[in-house]
Amino acid sequence: MDNLSDTLEKLKLTGSDCTSDKLDGCLDCLLQALGQNNVESSEKILQNGILQVFASLLNSQSSRTAKIAHIIAEIAKNEQMRIPCVDAGLIPPLVQLLNCKDQEILLQTGRALGNICYDSHSLQAQLINMGVIPTLVKLLGVHSQNTHLTEMCLVAFGNLAELESSKEQFASTNVADELVKLFKKQSEHEKKEMIFEVLAPLAENDAIKLQLVEAGLVECLLDIVHLTVNSEKDDDVAELKTASDLMVLLLLGDESMQKLFEGGKGSVFQRVLSWLPSHNHQLQLAGALAIANFARNDGNCIHMVDNGIVQKLIDLLDRHVEEGNVTVQHAALSALRNLAIPVVNKAKMLSAGVAEEVLKFLKSEMPPVQFKLLGTLRMLIDAQAEAAEQLGKNTKLVERLVEWCEAKDHAGVMGESNRLLSALIRHSKSKDVIRTIVESGGIKHLVTMATSEHVIMQNEALVALGLIAALELQTAECELESAKLVQVLHRLLSDERSAPEIKYNSMVLICAVMGSEPLHKEVQSLAFLDVVSKLRSHENKTVAQQASLTEQKLTVQS
């Protein structure tokens, strides 16, 4: 280490003179010392003020620049030295060096910046603001034959792409073209994996999704799927998963998805369809997720249902009923749910047997599958009275819904169960359905749903309860009483924050339940007249009119 101390002294003396022959020897000595004991050597370099010497040396490029950048890269491997490197002003001259032509300087500069800014979002953001992204993209294009430089650029992209602020800058470059060009040249798994690690975060941006599609990435991904689908090698299995996942990610952008759908005639869409009957679970999953993504607008949904997609999804689900793959079940149900949104598709899907297929998964104990199953049934029965009645009389289904209405650990499942319970009544308007729900203990959940924080759910509950009171009041009165419906309605009407439609439907319900003696007594015991008379001057005319009608009814029947 005495040798190092002498070297540092010499550097302080000759540092500003970058032509000095002594400088070369000093730099070699530093590299050697850092190789032997990085931490101790780095600390000595810091204590002797050599980082500032490096900053001034970097400002004037010379034959030693690469070596200086190399030393900085080695020093910055040491976590404690990163902030001192920043404080010494090393970042601006290093960023400037990214514009030079010398490949060794570029490589060592990239390493130095990468090590200094490693794991620091604030320093990486600083680099982005200094414009390194367009510079690095240009370097990748110019030096694509240099493996080390290419890898340096990819590592930098991977780090910078994690930051949201980088996406816009990447989108304004031709990074998509460069990465796809580079990807096409690769045969080694590790190299492809490196590029994948950059593509995945970049493809989260919609503009870049479209650029990647236009640059031909999808064709590359389809080729990988084709080559690896029947292989059992670990590398191939990993590559198949990454390629198919990335494919699905590209379809999350509206423009990129529509471009690949091509009116349902696109070769990419056709290839994805062929994944559904595959024996490979990963491909089945990616295929179902891709269909769910294509099914994000009515036009695509209608086209797909008219062209037989439903049967393909039913066949896929059928293979996963007993001991099935949960992710495939979830994905296929997601696709069916989306396809069931357009009004014209509902009857077609019901007659194709979708409801019966979905009911096979009622025994599932997996919340994600339960959630999608419920959503699919709710979409299917919207304005489909016959189907709503058929399902609403299915005791097994209704009992399962009542059970899931208590799934407090899974708010999504709980919410969807309540909504489906309400939908069965609202769309069937059937006394049999109401009786089934009363017998299964579902009434208390609809009353609780009326107090939800979501107005849409409150409203759905109140409309369903209104139908119960109009069609089967005597059957339900005990349950309505024990669920404290009248007190809930009083609270909703008294609460100034209640939406106009909630106030309106609560008053309609009050009028309806007065046909039951015990509920009528409860209405009389609470000061409903006071609350309702105040609503006669409500700014919403429909609410004000209903308040007048309700007040009359309350007065007459008091």
Image (cartoon, rainbow, N blue to C red):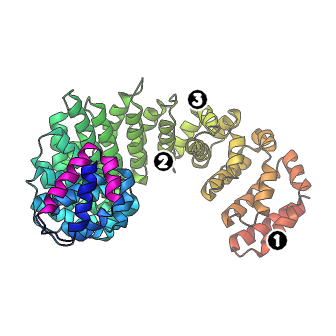
Under tag 1, what secondary structure? helix
Where is residue 497 drawn, in percent x and y? 71, 65
Q: Residue at x 66, y 52 (%)?
A: 452
- Determine the residue located farthest toward the left in the rendered image: 145
Read off the residue under disc 1: 534
Q: Which of the labelled discs sits on residue 379, or is there none? A: 2
- Give amino acid for label 1: Lys
Side of 433 where 304 appears, left or right: left
Disc with the residue nearer the chain's start (3 vs 1):
3
- Give amino acid for label 3: Lys
Give whichever of 358, 491 is nearer the camera.
491
Disc with the residue nearer the chain's start (3 vs 2):
2
Side of 184 where 249 appears, left or right: right
- Determine the residue located farthest toward the top in the rendered image: 322
Residue 37 seen by the camera: yes
Read off the residue under disc 3: 396
Q: Specify the segment rendered in magenta.
A: 21-46
Residue 34 highlighted magenta (yes or no) = yes
Q: Quadrant of the C terminus?
A: bottom right
Give whichever of 204, 288 is nearer the camera.
204
Where is residue 165 drawn, in percent x and y? 36, 65
Under tag 3, what secondary structure? helix
Side of 509 where 326 appears, left or right: left
Image mark count:
3
Q: Distance of mark 3 from mark 1, alpha carbons?
A: 45 Å
